[in-house]
Amino acid sequence: MLALMWRRFTKHKPAMLSLLILAIIVIGCVLAPLVVGYDPYNAPVELRRQPPSLAHLFGTDELGRDLLMRIWVGGRVSLVIGVAAMVISISIGTLVGALAGFYGGWLDNGLMRFNDFMLALPHLFILLLAAQLLRTLNVPEISGGPLPIIVIIGALSWMGAARLVRGQFLSLKAKEFVEAARVAGAQNHRIMWRHILPNAASPIIVAATLRVGNAIMTESTLSFLGFGIQPPMPTWGNMLKNAQSQMTLAPWVAIFPGLFIFAAVVAINYVGDGLRDALDPQHVE
Amino acid sequence: MTRYIFRRLLQAIPLLLLISIAVFALMQAIPGGPLAAYENNPNISPEDLMRLQEELGLNVPKWQQYLNWLGAVLRGDLGTSLVTRRPALTEIGERLPNTLYLSGIAFLGALLLSIPVGLVSAVRQYSWFDHAMTTLAFMGYSIPVFWFGLVLIILFNVTLKNPLTGGPLLPGGGMYTIGEDLTLEDRVAHLLLPASVLILHNLSNHVRYMRAGMLDVLHQDYIRTAHAKGLKERAVIMRHGFKNAILPLVTVIGLEIPGLFNGALLTETIFSWPGMGRLFFTSIERADYAVLMGVLMLSATLIVLFGLITDIVYAFLDPRIRFD
């Protein structure tokens, strides 16, 4: 089964290329800070705003820090946030969708109304307010760090997954294998999580992949606006925060971190696309 | 139909009430509050602070503050901006047309571009044009809006020069050149970059849905019938195909309305566009609650309203849908 999926996935050329790009980014983020000898936080001021050169492939920023080094370190933060926020978002979405789809009735009605309510909110406005709330609460250990951002991105982005899972549960709960499990005496929660959920795994995996890309994008947007991860900890988003004022002096500071956001998100989306083809052969574009 | 619209409008009321409660609660939870800036100001005595609190109605319980706010809103009063001391309604009213102007042009531009592109892409499926456009749409969907804005500024404002004047090719921000007479060229020049960012942002999704919708339609029986009765290719595509293929696009537009506000906030912030998004952004840092509430409720109302309009347009386009 896995071999078959992998064979189908390898046929999707953009997805294969994207997997390679992602692998390079991930390996770079994990290994580069251990290998390359630049300090991502402190650097001699004389080195500020150096254009790209052999010593500094992507140049240096307004404080003389090597940009590539900061991109690798920032990538760790951005990628971890992307994955962690996805886990929260997909977990909430799966729980809500499963309950709504399985039990139906007033529970379904209530949960889906809540879903509509969440979708009617101007998303970024609410994200900024929530980020401001967590920022001003000022809990010493976590403020300005990744945890609050992970939580708010996850908590505000589960609606699509909930709809998807609900649809899956609605159609799967009428299938014979559910009937069989019930006859065998299985309890509701066992039927939901042991019997139906595994059969709905494919679309959830695809949605989860795409969510990582979306979460990376959201984090970078929040950090760019100054409401996300606070300096000196770099992320791809907050590296761009000061870039706008540097554009005439050091345009590379604005270009390269964004290029990595772009590359990572495109690659993740293509991998999601490839997974869709691999996991769901019936799906036609 | 009228009954349906009426019912939907009635349903919107509890939804908007719920949103207002949630947003009010969220903002009340933010520590500091609107008077935080004054608390540390040595020139303001505790008595002054008390008087200010009373003046702004902050000395009553939260739930009463909410009810007071709600009552005022129903009378058309959004409260007073704490920063400018002007009515929040005036503040927002000045910015809203600018947002509608930019978003409207971007929205229409994206629509007018995406329909033919998606159409041709579907009709010539797997041609080089289709491949190029699907790839472009994929890229456009994945590009960070704010970064694309920065790149355009670097390219057209910092790097490229106007061959006649030697100045920047295009302005990097604002709605018009301050201190000069308003000219159409000037306004268009200021519009080009922010509108392009928003157009690409909206375009990619629209193209994908238009293409998918058209592909779906092209495999229907009635298209084969139209071909079989000897209609010209053009007539089949435009008369029989296009009209039906536009349906998924209408749905996706309805779903994307909330997203328009995200795009507006980002582009307005980057291009110093004096719109509602930027007003919201600056008001957060100043804890200007009246303005924040106003912008949020206005956006939520517009989202609900446009959602309703989308559904009505959908009903007009698809006679299979009946509302009775």
Image: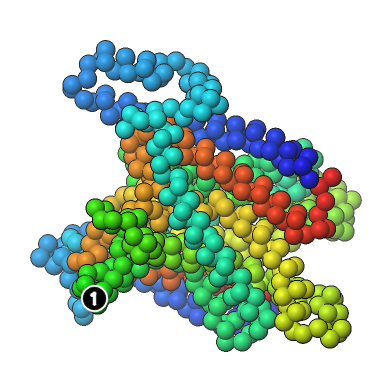
| Corner quadrant of residue A276 | bottom right
- For residue B24, above or below residue A258: above
Q: Nearer the viewer, residue B112 or B285?
A: B112
* Residue B323 seen anywhere in this rendered image of the structure: yes
The residue carrying mark 1 is B164
Which residue shows up at 54% across the image and 22% down it? B71
| Corner quadrant of residue A250 | bottom left
Q: Nearer the viewer, residue B142 or B215?
A: B215
Residue A236 drawn at (x, y percent): 36, 61
| Corner quadrant of residue B165 | bottom left
Q: Nearer the viewer, residue B252 or A241?
A: B252
Residue type (three-letter) at the residue carrying disc 1: Leu
Asked if residue B23 lies left or right of residue B124, the reply is left
* Residue A96 seen anywhere in this rendered image of the structure: no
- For residue A114, above or below residue A272: above
Q: How many marks?
A: 1
Which secondary structure, mark 1? loop
Asked if residue B130 lies left or right of residue B213, the reply is left
Residue B202 drawn at (x, y percent): 53, 63
